Image (spheres, rainbow, N blue to C red):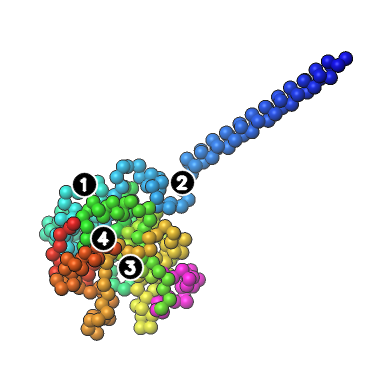
Amino acid sequence: MTRKPASRRGVVWLGWKLVIAFSVSLCLLALLRIQLQYRSVATLAPPLSVAGNEIALRDYYSGDRPKVAFLFLARRDLPLDFLWDSFFKGVDQANFSVYVHSVPGFVFNEETTRSQYFYNRQLNNSIKVIWGESSMIAAERLLFASALEDLANQRFLLLSDRCAPLYDFGYIYRYIISSPKSFVDSFLHTKETRYSVNMSSVIPEEKWRKGSQWISVIRSHAEVIVNDGIVFPVFKKFCKRQNRRNCIPDEHYVQTLLTMRGLESEMERRTLTYTVWNVSGSKYETQTWHPVTFTFENSGPGQIKEIKVHYIFVCDKHHNHWIYTFE
């Protein structure tokens, strides 16, 4: 009589064990199924936002050596082409590409440039550019669009025809590629009256930014610049040189656009290009809003050494005095 209850308890306990084991198995199977579905979606779905890090490089480009695209905004020819020729000489061309926006119809060939690296590198869809107007940022967008056609281009350097490198190619390549962020000089601008209330419906004043035109951006940011169809039309209409409001588009466009897209955390908010603005010249010089001209007096070894602490390029208004060797 005393054995039956024990036997019944054993049967009940065995039943509970089976129920628990079955439940645990169902949970494990459910978790496995969810994990497999997640991996499938993650594999098939494109990234919603590219942060510009190493993962982004693999998403866009499967090669081992991403390129740096050198984008030159030129008035006509490139006065410092001989310097850039020395810079590129001996470098594996799988590491870089060159694009030049010049006046429509100008061709870079043996007669117009001293460097083979610029042969036929002009854009065929270039436009007439007027300094201080929206045509300048339109030309920039054309350069970025052309460079984006090559998937290997992962960093995009915007330079003027008066810019010169301060280091050799290897150093600059490593410096730019190793950073997952864009180098865009960008700061809140409140002192001058360049912002127009006419922009407010699209561009809030708190998003208005200013900075250097010469930038280095990651691929995802270059795509934002090229694909923008909202901010650019506003700049074209309201950011102009006027008597009371001298709005210079190229000093505000990229900075404001990336800020509006919430990308400030993906930027090193500084420029890699050194310029000095004229603050003590003649009345004409101080009103031209261009960088000063470097001469033997203000661009000796000591001055260059100081500049190289924080910058890897230097730009000036003219080019008559450049005698330089890379270190």
Q: In terms of sequence position, does the residue under pointer 4 or pointer 1 come before the other?
A: 1
Three-letter code for the amino acid on which mark 2 is drawn: Pro
Instruction: Please identify the quadrant where the C terminus is shown.
Output: bottom left
Mark 3: few/some/many CA within 10 Å (<14, 14-19, 20+): many
- Residue 174 is situated, as x and y percent measured from the top left of the image, at 28, 51
Labelled pair 1, 2 in contact (Cβ < 8 Å): no
Q: Which residue is mark 3?
A: 212
Q: Residue at x 15, y 62 (%)?
A: 324
Question: Label 4 vs label 3: CA separation?
Answer: 15 Å
Sequence-wise, the earlier of marks 4 and 3 is 3
Q: Residues within 10 Å of mark 4 (few under 14, many from 20)?
A: some
Q: Which residue is mark 4?
A: 312
Where residue 319 sits in the image (x, y, percent)? 17, 68
SS of the residue at dot 3? loop
Label 2–label 3 contact, CB within 8 A:
no
Magenta region, residue range: 192-209
Marks 1 and 3 sit apart, C-alpha to C-alpha, by 30 Å
Residue 235 lies in quadrant: bottom left
Name the element at disc 4.
loop
Three-letter code for the amino acid on which mark 1 is drawn: Asp
Residue for point 33% across, 56% down:
145
Task: Identify which residue, 82 or 46, lies in the foreground.
Answer: 82
Q: Give the residue furthest to the front.
A: 2
Instruction: Name the element at disc 1.
Output: loop
Q: Main secondary structure of the magenta part?
A: loop
Residue plotted at (86% across, 16% down): 2
Q: Mark 1 or 2 closer to N-term? A: 2
Q: Is residue 13 left or right of residue 132?
A: right
